[in-house]
Image: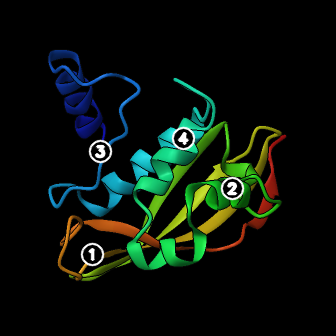
Amino acid sequence: MNRFILIFIFILSISKISYADLLKPSPLLKPQQVIAIQLSALNNNDIPYKDFGIEQTFEFAHPNNKKYTGPLAKFTKMMYSQSYISMINHQSHNISLVMSSENIALFFIEITDIKGSKLGFEWIIEKVNIQGNFYDCWMTTSVSPPMKFGEST
């Protein structure tokens, strides 16, 4: 994954892509890369502008998920709710693959929030199988409410 991030930074540095441009789903992105993009954006939510991280995360919401969580204003409100606010500007995260198949992947995400609390989330992504702009792209279908499992000392 670190190699992906270095390659991504290199591509950004030689391309005409603005730092403020949202990354878009692509069939070239692997499941763990999709989650890394979302979590990195949420980790720095207000860079380069307020709630950029939330908007970036919403870009990778599966079309079926957006039916329930969208539009962006509704998704933003949900991210600031008690269930998900710990993701915004968190201190650190760890991504662990639990299971993967051809079209679905389940990850356990450990987040240390801004206050130092450790929380866990089950994060499911699936390949879009509907013809259209996102066909064959990995996108988020579900994120569990947080599971508190420890405090940092």
The image shows residue 113, relative to residue 124, as above or below, that is above
Residue 6, by quadrant, is top left
**What kind of element bears circle 2?**
helix
Which colour style is shown?
A: rainbow
Label 3, label 1: how far apart the Cα atoms are: 20 Å
Of discs 2 and 3, which sits in the foreground?
A: 2
**What kind of element bears circle 1?**
strand
Q: Are marks 2 and 3 in contact (CB under 8 Å)?
A: no
Give the mark nearest the N terminus, 2 or 3: 3
Image coordinates for residue 82, horizontal then vertical, percent: 83, 60
Locate residue 147 relative to residue 21 in the image: left or right. right
**What kind of element bears circle 4?**
helix
Label 2, label 3: how far apart the Cα atoms are: 26 Å
Q: Are marks 3 and 1 in contact (CB under 8 Å)?
A: no
Of discs 3 and 4, which sits in the foreground?
A: 4
Of discs 3 and 1, which sits in the foreground?
A: 1
Give the mark nearest the N terminus, 3 or 1: 3
* Residue at image point 63% right, 31% down: 50
Residue 31, which numbered label? none
Label 2, label 1: how far apart the Cα atoms are: 23 Å
Neighbour tally class for label 4: few under 14, some 14-19, many 20 plus, Cα within 10 Å: many
Residue at which label 1 appears: 127
Q: Amino acid at mark 4?
A: Gly
Residue 99, by quadrant, is bottom left
Residue 79, which numbered label? 2
Label 2, label 4: how far apart the Cα atoms are: 10 Å
Label 4, label 1: how far apart the Cα atoms are: 22 Å
Residue at which label 3 appears: 1
Residue at which label 4 appears: 53
Give the mark nearest the N terminus, 4 or 1: 4
Image coordinates for residue 19, horizontal then vertical, percent: 37, 23
